[in-house]
């Protein structure tokens, strides 16, 4: 029935993760880790609550020469839409 509504497992896990379901957060983080773009994958994992993903993302950005953004990710984190946070 949920498939008929256009929802797949990842959508369901994301919805459950957003309600605070800890198990769903980790399952969602694992599911999005398979995204073909490593940066997108790490951002989604970090938003899902994977504590190491934000630091991995920061390191990846630094390696790519995006040091200012790397510092912001490490210090300020991400916005709810997955973009890099900016100072207030």
Image (tube, grey):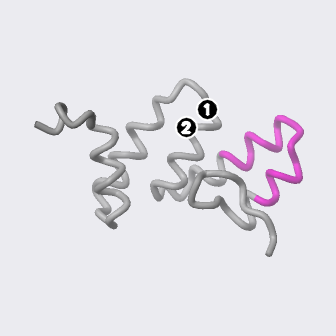
Crowd class of label 2 (few under 14; some 14 to 19; many from 20; radius 10 Å): many
Outermost front residue: 5
x and y, in percent, of residue 57 in the image: 67, 46
The answer to whether 34 is drawn above or below residue 25 in the figure is above
Label 1, label 2: how many angstroms apart (C-alpha)?
5 Å
Q: In which quarter of the image is residue 86?
A: bottom right
Q: Cβ–Cβ below 8 Å for labels 1 and 2?
A: yes
**Quadrant, the N terminus:** top left
In the displayed structure, does residue 18 sit left or right of residue 56?
left
- Residue drawn at x 32%, y 53% is 15
Task: Provide residue 56's location: percent of width, then percent of height.
Answer: 65, 46
How would you classify the magenta stretch by its main secondary structure?
helix
Residue 49: x and y in percent read 47, 58
**What residue does disc 1 label?**
38
The disc label shown at residue 41, or none? 2
Q: In this view, does 72 lie to the left or right of 18?
A: right
Give the residue displayed 37% in from the left and 46% down from the top: 28
């Amino acid at each position: 029935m949920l498939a008929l509504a256009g929802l797949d497992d990842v959508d369901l896990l994301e919805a459950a993760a957003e309600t605070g379901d800890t198990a769903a957060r980790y399952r969602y983080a694992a599911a999005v880790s398979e995204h073909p773009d490593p940066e997108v994958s790490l951002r989604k994992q970090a938003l899902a609550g994977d504590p190491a993903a934000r630091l991995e993302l920061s390191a990846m950005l630094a390696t790519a020469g995006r040091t200012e953004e790397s510092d912001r990710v490490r210090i300020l984190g991400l916005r709810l839409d997955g973009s890099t946070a900016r100072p207030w």
